[in-house]
């Protein structure tokens, strides 16, 4: 009986959400904030990738928050899965073909990740994407080699230093500019690698941080046996 | 570097990133970091408070004018709440200093710092998506802290909290999505300005999503199923964090949103009804509890019900009384959780029946518990008396006689179950003595709270003088819009 009522309520709720969202026009231009970003963000931020301009500059504070959420997830997981004695992965060694191939691809994946976050202000992608790509490279190695280990000490250094870099760039804006996270470096010519002021610096920090954090998370969760 | 409200968010965040590095050099130093950070934040709070009272500080993050960037709004209300969070955070740190000693305690302090970041962020931000981000930070830190002891009960409580909390986040995010679709902006002041054009059915649906989403974290009945477990299974200082910081920040978020965007009176009546139900059910459940921390958890929900009633009145004295009750409840419930934590520690059991005669064995800790119990009941020389009196007066002003009677009934229930515990402490024969002593830092934390509670009880006007402008800020929507968007008054009157 309870289950029937639950399903019924869920159905009603689902119907209302559907009815509201089905009438919402998609892809229609409003004369609002989004329009302003499309027209002015290149000259305001110097980044030709408008998504990056919004994520790192206009709404950079949210990005700092998102970086914190990931950091928090890694820290919380570390606290809950904490064990004095080290743990090991249950995975078996992969076949020779996979092992050789992943050894070849691994550095290339890392390189691609680095490329994506360094060019975040020019091409699609950025710190989060680049960091995630790097972590997939490490995951590939975890799967292929049972004994492949990451240096936890180094990972935690990278995590902390990258996070502190982001906050420090923000505070620098407060010291030398007028507000937190203000772009205090020259914007340069759009479409060149050295442009958009602090945006590439922030994305490099985010890339390192996300890469290190996701790697540590994967390592933590794959290790299940003592 | 000039002082600015963003430091309430940036400095604890920086500290959380820094703690692992300090931990590599010396584990003991880590314990000092939150204390230093919170002392610095109280310095910032003391400096900014008079400026915020005089004229709200609107900080444009990254230098973009609203609504194109994120703003922080530091007015009287935010000034009051950030100061409260800093004060409560400081005593919780002092108490944790000797209480949280098992590994990995550096992670505990990191999570604690991030929770402070999140809750000050919720209070300060003037942007609704930014508020969501900080809500997430606060909630995820709270989940992890609940399971910090890594035992079965803690894991279960944390998992329950995580599941319900995820619903909360999803609902809030859906509501924000709908608002952005309708108004094309995320700035709170700008939304409030454009909300008039949104069709009423849409408005109601957004409101329902907000009430369910934020009501889960603000412990409104029937959405508070996670709370008793989380409060009682988490380490004691974390229980104090929930009651003193997390709930206060989320109820602020809910009330800010309701007053800014859905300012019609039937909505506020709904809050009065929900508040009454929450209060009565929670107080009756508290009566039936055998575990002391569960009892405190239900009492905390009941007190939040009282706060919601007062907010729902929609009058300036009502809002002021609600803020006063939030302030008092944060102090008193923290004191109760602190003393209950050590009572549980000394008696070796979470059950109330194990507390017999501890009044003689552990006089100071028991004294602080009795002090807190008398204060929360609302006995005259303590702070709790004034806020309850003001709530009753403002409810009576609104001619809601039934609500007055129900509040008094719940107050009687409260007296019964608190005095039951106090009488066990003092009038039963002691069963066993515990040679371990309550650490000095714990007693100091309780002492600070007791002094503040007594001071506010003797001189309530010191707090009330600050609360009047804070209540006015919450009520006066057009002033918020004008300052938040830097409009001159002429332009605004045309838009309305």
Image (spheres, coloured by chain):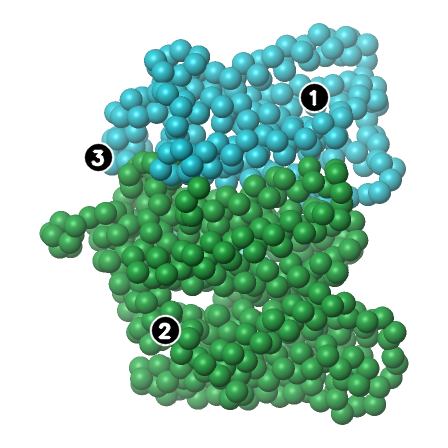
Chain colours: A cyan, B green
| Mark 3 Cα shell of 10 Å, populated few (<14), some (14-19), many (≥20) | few
List x then y, in percent, for residue A182.
39, 33
The span from disc 2 to disc 3 (Cα, nearest Å) is 43 Å
> Viewed as shown, does residue B112 lie left or right of B486?
right
Q: From the viewer's side, name the closer residue of B269 and B493.
A: B493
User: Label 1: which residue?
Assistant: A138
Query: Which circle's residue, 3 or 1, is located before the other in the chain?
Result: 3
Tag 1: Cα neighbours inside 10 Å, few (<14), some, or many (≥20)? many
Mark 2–mark 1 CB contact (< 8 Å): no
Query: Where residue B196 sits: x, y (%)?
Result: 22, 53
Label 2 and label 1: CA atoms lie apart by: 58 Å
Query: A100 above or below B1?
Result: above
Q: Which residue lies furthest to the front in this view?
A: B1
Q: Badge 3 sits on which subunit?
A: A
The answer to whether B477 is drawn above or below residue B73 in the figure is below
Q: Which residue is drawn at 88% across and 37% down?
A: A226
């Amino acid at each position: 009986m309870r289950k029937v009522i639950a399903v019924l309520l869920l159905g009603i709720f689902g119907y209302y959400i559907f009815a509201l969202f089905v009438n919402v026009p998609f892809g229609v231009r409003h004369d609002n904030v989004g329009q302003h970003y499309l027209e002015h963000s290149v000259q305001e931020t110097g980044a030709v990738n408008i998504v990056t301009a919004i994520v790192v500059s206009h709404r950079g504070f949210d990005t700092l928050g998102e970086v914190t959420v990931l950091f928090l997830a890694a820290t919380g997981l570390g606290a809950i899965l904490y064990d004095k004695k080290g743990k090991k992965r249950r995975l078996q060694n992969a076949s020779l073909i996979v092992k050789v191939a992943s050894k070849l691809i691994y550095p290339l994946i890392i390189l691609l990740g680095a490329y994506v976050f360094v060019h975040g202000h020019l091409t699609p992608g950025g710190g989060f994407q680049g960091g995630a790509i790097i972590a997939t490279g490490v995951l590939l190695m975890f799967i292929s080699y049972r004994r492949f280990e990451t240096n936890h000490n180094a990972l935690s250094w990278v995590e902390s230093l990258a996070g502190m870099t982001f906050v420090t760039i923000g505070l620098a804006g407060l010291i030398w500019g007028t507000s937190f996270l203000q772009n205090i470096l020259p914007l340069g010519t759009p479409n060149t690698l050295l442009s958009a002021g602090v945006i590439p610096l922030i994305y490099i920090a985010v890339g390192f941080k996300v890469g290190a954090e996701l790697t540590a998370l994967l390592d933590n969760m794959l290790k299940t046996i003592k | 570097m000039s002082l600015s409200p963003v430091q309430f968010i940036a400095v604890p965040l920086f500290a959380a990133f820094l703690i692992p590095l300090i931990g590599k050099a010396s584990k003991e130093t880590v314990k000092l970091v939150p204390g230093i950070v919170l002392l610095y934040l109280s310095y910032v709070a003391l400096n900014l408070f008079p400026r915020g009272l005089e004229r709200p500080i609107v900080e444009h993050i990254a230098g973009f004018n609203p609504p194109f960037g994120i703003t922080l709004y530091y007015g009287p209300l935010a000034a009051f709440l950030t100061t409260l969070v800093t004060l409560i955070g400081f005593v919780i740190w002092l108490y944790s200093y000797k209480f949280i000693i098992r590994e990995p305690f550096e992670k505990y302090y990191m999570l604690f710092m991030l929770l402070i970041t999140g809750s000050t962020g919720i209070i300060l931000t003037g942007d609704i998506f930014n508020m969501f981000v900080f809500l997430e930070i606060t909630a995820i830190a709270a989940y992890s802290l609940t399971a910090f002891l890594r035992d079965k009960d803690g894991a279960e409580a944390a998992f329950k909290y995580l599941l319900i909390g995820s619903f909360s986040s999803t609902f809030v995010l859906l509501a924000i999505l709908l608002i952005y679709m309708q108004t094309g902006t995320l700035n709170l002041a700008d939304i409030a300005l454009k909300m008039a054009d949104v069709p009423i059915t849409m408005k109601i649906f957004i409101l329902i999503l907000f009430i369910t989403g934020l009501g889960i974290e603000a412990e409104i009945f029937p959405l508070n199923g996670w709370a008793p477990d989380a409060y009682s299974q988490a380490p004691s200082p974390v229980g104090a964090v929930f009651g003193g910081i997390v709930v206060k920040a989320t109820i602020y978020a809910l009330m800010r949103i309701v007053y800014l965007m859905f300012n019609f009176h039937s909505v506020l009546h709904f809050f009065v009804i929900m508040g009454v139900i929450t209060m009565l059910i929670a107080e009756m459940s508290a009566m039936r509890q055998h575990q002391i921390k569960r009892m405190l958890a239900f009492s905390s929900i009941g007190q939040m019900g009282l706060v919601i009633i007062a907010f729902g009145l929609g009058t300036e004295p009502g809002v002021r009384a609600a803020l006063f009750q939030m302030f008092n409840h944060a102090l008193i419930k923290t004191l109760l959780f602190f003393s209950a934590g050590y009572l549980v520690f000394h008696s070796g059991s979470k059950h109330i029946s194990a507390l017999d005669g501890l009044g003689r064995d552990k006089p100071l800790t028991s004294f602080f518990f009795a002090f807190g119990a008398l204060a929360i009941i609302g006995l005259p020389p303590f702070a709790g008396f004034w806020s309850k009196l003001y709530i009753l007066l403002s409810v009576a002003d609104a001619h809601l006689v039934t609500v007055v009677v129900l509040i008094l009934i719940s107050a009687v229930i409260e007296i019964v179950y608190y005095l039951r515990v106090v009488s066990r402490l003092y009038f039963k024969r002691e069963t066993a003595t515990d040679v371990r002593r309550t650490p000095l830092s714990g007693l100091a934390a309780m002492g600070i709270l007791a002094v503040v509670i007594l001071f506010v009880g003797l001189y309530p006007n010191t707090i009330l003088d600050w609360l009047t402008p804070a209540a006015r800020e919450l009520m006066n929507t057009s002033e918020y819009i004008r300052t938040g968007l830097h409009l001159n008054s002429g332009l605004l009157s045309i838009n309305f």
